[in-house]
Image (cartoon, rainbow, N blue to C red):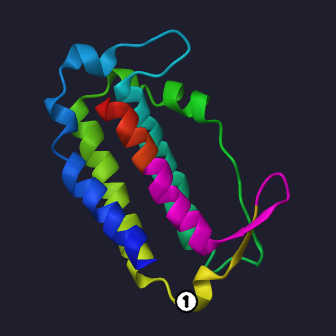
C-alpha cells in the first residue's frame, strides 16, 4: 500500500502545476469520440468524488460493500468541464485527491481486506480498489501529458 501512496503523491506533486501550463487550445481540442484533455481532467475529478465516497463509506456501511457505478460520459458533460477554468479545475482535482491520500494513509490493514462487490458481482477488496485508483489516475494523466 505504501508504494501506491508514494506513487499517488508523486503524481499529484508532478502534475498540480503542470496542467495550467498547457496551451488552452490543446487543452480544449477534441478528437471525434474522445474527450479533450480538460474533459479528461474533469473525469478524474468525477472519479475522485466517487472514490472518496467509496473509500469512506466502506468503513461504516454493511459488508460486503456494494460498488455503485456512475455514468462517466454524462457526468463529464453535465459538469461542463470543457468550459471550466483550468486553474479552478486543477485545484478541485488536487483538493479531492489530497483527501483521498489522507484516507489511504489512515486506513488500517483490516479495512484493506473489506470486500467490494462490483456491478458484475465480481469481488475485490479495498486494497485493490485503492491501488487501482492510483493506476487509473496515472493512465489518464499520461493521456493529458501526451
Quarter where residue 105 is shown? bottom left
Classify 10 Å Cα crowding around label 1: few (below 14), some (14-19), many (20 and above).
Answer: few
Residue corresponding to mark 1: 109
Q: Residue furthest right?
A: 121
Measured as percent of width and height from the top left, residue 22 is found at 19, 27
Measured as percent of width and height from the top left, residue 42 is found at 41, 36
Q: Nearer the viewer, residue 136 or 72?
A: 136
Looking at the image, residue 50 lies above or below residue 53: above
Q: Would residue 85 appear left or right of 116 to someone viewing this image?
A: left
Looking at the image, residue 108 lies above or below residue 22: below
Question: What secondary structure is marked by label 1?
Answer: helix
Q: Is residue 122 on the magenta stretch?
A: yes
Q: Would residue 108 appear left or right of 70 to someone viewing this image?
A: left
Measured as percent of width and height from the top left, residue 6 is found at 32, 70
Asked whether residue 57 appears in the rendered view, the answer is: no
Quadrant into which the C terminus falls: top left
Instruction: Give the residue displayed 50% in from the left and 30% down from the top.
Output: 76
Q: Nearer the viewer, residue 21 or 57?
A: 21
Looking at the image, residue 112 lies above or below residue 72: below
Instruction: Give the residue displayed 51% in from the left and 89% down from the top.
Output: 108
Q: Is residue 119 on the magenta stretch?
A: yes
Q: Which residues are magenta?
A: 118-137
Q: Residue furthest top?
A: 32
Looking at the image, residue 8 lies above or below residue 136: below
Instruction: Give the residue displayed 65% in from the left and 43% down from the top.
Output: 70
Instruction: Give the residue displayed 47% in from the left and 37% down from the top.
Output: 43
| Main SS of residues in magenta | helix
Measured as percent of width and height from the top left, residue 35 is found at 47, 22
Asked whether residue 117 appears in the rendered view, the answer is: yes
Amino acid at each position: 500500500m505504501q508504494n501506491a501512496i508514494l506513487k499517488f503523491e508523486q503524481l499529484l506533486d508532478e502534475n498540480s502545476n503542470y496542467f495550467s501550463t498547457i496551451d488552452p487550445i490543446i487543452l480544449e481540442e477534441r478528437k471525434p469520440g474522445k474527450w479533450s484533455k480538460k474533459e479528461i481532467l474533469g473525469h478524474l475529478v468525477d472519479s475522485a468524488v466517487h472514490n472518496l465516497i467509496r473509500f469512506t463509506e466502506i468503513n461504516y456501511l454493511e459488508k460486503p460493500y456494494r460498488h455503485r457505478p456512475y455514468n462517466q460520459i454524462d457526468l463529464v458533460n453535465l459538469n461542463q468541464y470543457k468550459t471550466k477554468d483550468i486553474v479552478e479545475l486543477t485545484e478541485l482535482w488536487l483538493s479531492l485527491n489530497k483527501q483521498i491520500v489522507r484516507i489511504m494513509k489512515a486506513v488500517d490493514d483490516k479495512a484493506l481486506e473489506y470486500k467490494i462487490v462490483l456491478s458484475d458481482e465480481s469481488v475485490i477488496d479495498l486494497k485493490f480498489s485503492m491501488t487501482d485508483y492510483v493506476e487509473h489516475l496515472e493512465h489518464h494523466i499520461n493521456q493529458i501529458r501526451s
